[in-house]
Image (cartoon, rainbow, N blue to C red):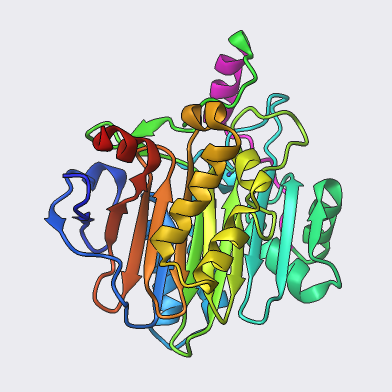
Amino acid sequence: MFNRRKFIKLSAAGASLATLSKYVVAKPLPVAGKLPIVISTWDFGVAANKEAWKTLEKGGRALDAVEAGVRIPEADMKNHTVGRAGYPDRDGRVTLDACIMDEFGNCGSVAAMENIAHPISVARLVMEKTPHVMLVGDGATQFAVEQGMKREKLLTPESYKEWQKWLRKAEYSPVMNIENQQKRPGGKYNHDTIGMLAIDSKGNISGACTTSGMAFKMHGRVGDSPIIGAGLYVDNEVGGATSTGVGEEVIRNVGSFLVVELMRQGLSPEDACREAVNRIIKKKPEIAKKIQVGFLAINKKGEYGAYALQEGFSYAVCDAKQQDLLIPGKSAYKDEKKDK
Ligand code: SD4
């Protein structure tokens, strides 16, 4: 039944895609979670949250937790949508985007950055070591190298092969879930950007978002993920939000900022995400039918929720009670079908 919340329990360490076998228990959510808490987008959020939790459980800062957390998918050689093994653009160049935001409203971002495996850490350095918010392209790479990061070739043999395959047709149009190369048992998708939001034991909120963007995009294309307010936004008085999917539609609606402002007006995280999805549908109904966009949000109390255009979106939750919870997000077009 669509309205019931379901989750997957994974084995403690070494949880992998192969272990994602079934949705089991229904549970009423969102809950007023006990702090600290960390949530993040997609199946790979489970492993990322676990890493973030190591900082949070020791009373560490949410900012440190989200950076450490999203570095896990960034380093994962099987993950072709985030970090070092991300698929390239249509010219065969791997260009990475990321941003980070803390409880004081400080933020940092890199976009279209090549040859550096951990864009989230560069984004944090932009935030902490420069007077700027955003560095792009060669300037971002140069800054990362100056800060002691390794310059390396990121195009993996697997990514190269996929790019060559794509070149045979070379169709440039964002196809829904194009990044997806692996499927969960049951045909659910596993892909996309990681957006992570954490509240630490002091009640402070931070967020991080990192991606290789749309696979086989035009060279120089930047999506929502490194754009503060679009792919990520945090306001320590209210909460935080992040997005995944076709970034162009998120940018048009300044999606994550919108979700946080809606929560400020009293909407629950899920309702705020739903309203942001509805704005996308309202502005571009024909495009909205064909693409995926998902929002994930948390409020100051630790209540969380998500909403997506299409089925298949999932997010992971980790707090003192549940370290490995994966929840399928609700979606606009599935709701519509159910209502008929
Ligand atoms: C982008 N939102 O670059 C990111 C990537 C993503 O499905 O989530 N793709 O638009």
Q: Nearer the viewer, residue 146 or 295?
A: 295
Residue 312's place in the image compared with 181, above or below, is below
Compared with 251, 102 (above or below) is: below
Give coordinates of residue 243: x percent, y percent.
53, 52
Residue drawn at the location 84% of the way across and 67% of the way down: 132
Q: Residue, x 45% and y 67% (percent of image)?
A: 267
Residue 156 drawn in magenta: yes
Q: Range of the magenta residues?
A: 149-167
Q: Residue at x 35, y 59 (%)?
A: 316
Q: Is residue 75 visible?
A: no
Residue 6 can be seen in this image: yes
The quarter of the image holding the C terminus is top left
Hey, which quadrant is residue 302 in on the image?
bottom left
- Counting the numbered discs, the total is 0
Q: Is residue 306 above or below residue 264?
A: above
Is residue 326 shown left or right of residue 37? left
